[in-house]
Image (cartoon, coloured by chain):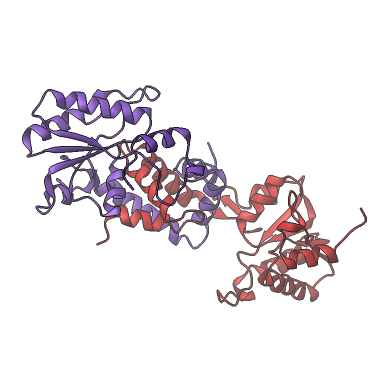
Chain colours: A purple, B red
């Protein structure tokens, strides 16, 4: 059987952002005496496992006793606009920016040949049902700016074509803030040029 | 009560090597469905909590059913040399280098005014007892190269002065491999110059 410390290092190194070395440092910090940090992490994981779930409406993260989630039930949020994202975590990123006051819909993935994720694996049907049921007038596609994001956007547009007409938009492509032409890849430059606006 | 996801992010961000952003990414990966990674991390932490302990002899990490640890009981390791380190994790770093075949002794800290760690908080008495009991001829101090490491080294020397005479050495100071004068701080340069050897 794998030694417990090696096992812990291996599992930690599977977390995004942790390389082998930082997983090792984290594991050593966790088994260090007194074991307060390990106990706290155990409790936090148990708590998250027991309470965190996905909202039945938008698919974002919420807790079991708040489903639909606060974003879906907040009457001050505009029900006419749904921002479609790939991952539940993307909702947190947009909320942190504080620039959107409509509703969300997390697809739980994107169309990907490499990961064998097809349209049927995404929460696409649920989106069509929301559009039929809710007073939606615009769908904003906040999907990735890669080929898989493009394919996902195409599927959403295809899906909505059959139903009630709604406006479908996509987040602008261009240079990120605090960056410059010298730091940008050719495709970003091409798209930033194509989307140029009056200065 | 703190929302479970915020709580998990806060605890994860206390691990060394994880900033706020990477703790957030790690937490989102953990609560993502299916929850295989969260289950694995929970199991690895439970396993570590139940089995990892510190060796009664050297103070390094081991498991409950191997105490004293394999490094202390391996008859091929030289019992005449004890390498004194601050943290149990330091033993793993030296073992990984594969350059030392003696025994170890982890002090579990270093003398630090800032953290109110005095000599009595360290495993110093246990070291003196080992020197009295085991056939030790040399103590290698592999402590940090900062003021606290210097103070710790001084305490170990003081401690051993009363007992049977043993050679006390300290790891060499100097430039790290794959580095250069341009990357080194003044104190390192001063010590590297002071310890210069025939080329």
Lateral position of residue A194 relative to residue B86, left or right:
left
In the picture as drawn, the residue positioned furthest to the front comes out as A198
Q: Nearer the viewer, residue A186 or B132?
A: A186
Would you identify the image quadrant in which residue B155 lies?
A: bottom right
In the picture as drawn, the residue positioned furthest to the right comes out as B198
Q: Position of residue A119 (x, y in %)?
A: 26, 24
Q: Nearer the viewer, residue B105 or A121?
A: A121
Q: How many marks?
A: 0
Residue A70 in view (yes/no): yes
Q: Position of residue A167 (x, y in %)?
A: 15, 34
Lateral position of residue B108 relative to residue A76, left or right:
right
Q: Position of residue A107 (x, y in %)?
A: 25, 34
Residue drawn at (62%, 69%) of the image: B122
Q: Nearer the viewer, residue A93 or B137?
A: A93
Q: Position of residue A96 (x, y in %)?
A: 30, 54
Q: Is residue B81 above or below residue A166?
A: below
Residue drawn at (71%, 65%) of the image: B145
Residue drawn at (13%, 51%) of the image: A77
Residue drawn at (81%, 59%) of the image: B135
Would you identify the image quadrant in which residue B166 lies?
A: bottom right
Q: Nearer the viewer, residue A158 or B127?
A: A158
Residue B60 in view (yes/no): no
């Amino acid at each position: 059987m794998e030694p417990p410390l090696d096992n812990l290092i291996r599992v930690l190194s599977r977390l995004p952002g942790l390389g082998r070395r930082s997983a090792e440092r984290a594991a050593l910090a966790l088994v260090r005496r007194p074991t307060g940090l390990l106990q706290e992490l155990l409790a936090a994981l148990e708590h998250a496992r027991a309470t965190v779930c996905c909202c039945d409406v938008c698919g974002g993260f919420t807790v079991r006793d708040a489903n639909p989630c606060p974003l879906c039930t907040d009457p001050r949020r505009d029900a006419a606009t749904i921002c479609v994202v790939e991952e539940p975590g993307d909702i947190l990123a947009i909320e942190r920016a504080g620039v959107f006051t409509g509703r969300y819909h997390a697809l739980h993935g994107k169309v990907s040949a490499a990961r064998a994720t097809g349209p049927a694996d995404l929460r696409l049907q649920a989106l069509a049902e929301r559009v039929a049921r809710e007073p939606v007038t615009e769908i904003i596609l906040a999907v990735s700016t890669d080929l898989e994001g493009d394919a996902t956007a195409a599927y959403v547009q295809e899906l909505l074509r059959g139903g009630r007409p709604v406006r479908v938009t996509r987040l602008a492509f261009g240079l990120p803030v605090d960056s410059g032409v010298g730091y940008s890849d050719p495709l970003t430059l091409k798209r930033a040029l194509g989307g140029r606006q009056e200065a």
